[in-house]
Amino acid sequence: MVHVFVLVCLWHLTGVFGESVSVTDGDSVTLHTGLNKLMGDDVIKWRFGAENTLLTKINVMTKRLDIYDNVIDGRFIDRLKMDYQTASLTITNIRPEHAGVYKLQTNSVSKSFSITVYPHLPVPVLIRDCSSSSSSSSVQYCSVVCSVVNVSAVSLSWYKGNSLLSSISVSDLSISLSLPLEVEYQDKNTYSCVINNPISNQTTHLDINTLCQTSEVSKNV
């Protein structure tokens, strides 16, 4: 489908530069052009991907804005919005299939945006591993496993206060991650398990008294 709008302003152009943009799946992202005003003979185009598929076009002379959101199997339908003052492009409810390179083209300026879409992060789950719990003389230890499922491009880490104890990472594959931690039953320090990607994180704090002591009582009953 093609949407046609009437523009009421003429603008003048300023220079812009490329950049990388990261966004979470389902959010909206705006690609800011850095444009101030456009000249009367300007034609501004937004293109996407290696094939330079045309998404939008503003013709200032004819005062017309066209949005071609039915391209590439319709993945952009009802997701594209334009700012009439700046020609900035907004993609709403963004999905992984919208990741890629977006190109702004004008009569005198071109600019590229590389968009990366990250999935929502799950909250880490803490489980006591009874088979790994141990004791040494009068000191008893509790083994806890922090886990997350179906994740990619993340790191999973244990912290003692603000100090990193251990960490494991995964790149592109969607897999499950587990990271163990052994603590003393009487340990009064603060421990937390954190999953993070470049733009967000989720944290679960370890309550030793609740997780370890309750499990020990249940085991001895």
Image (cartoon, rainbow, N blue to C red):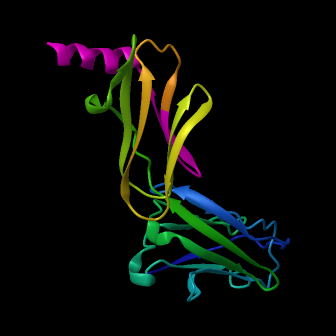
Residue shown at 70% from the left, 75% from the top: 112
Evaluate whether residue 119 shows in this view. yes
In this rendered view, identify the residue nearer to me: 75 or 204: 204
In this rendered view, identify the residue nearer to me: 176 or 128: 128
Residue 16, image x, y percentages: 81, 70
Residue 151, image x, y percentages: 40, 54
Which region is colored magenta? 193-221
Figure check: 199 above or below 97: above
Residue 189 magenta: no
**Image quarter hosting the C terminus:** top left
Q: How many circles with numbers are drawn on the protein?
A: 0
Residue 129, image x, y percentages: 30, 32
Q: Is residue 6 left or right of residue 215?
A: right
Figure check: 23 above or below 186: below
Residue shown at 44% from the left, 47% from the top: 121
Evaluate whether residue 91 shows in this view. no
Q: Residue furthest bottom?
A: 51
**Image quarter hosting the N terminus:** bottom left
In this rendered view, identify the residue nearer to me: 112 or 41: 112
Residue 198 magenta: yes
Residue shown at 39% from the left, 21% from the top: 141
* Res. 5 image quadrant: bottom right
Residue 58, image x, y percentages: 66, 79
Q: Is residue 16 left or right of residue 8?
A: right
Residue shown at 27% from the left, 28% from the top: 130
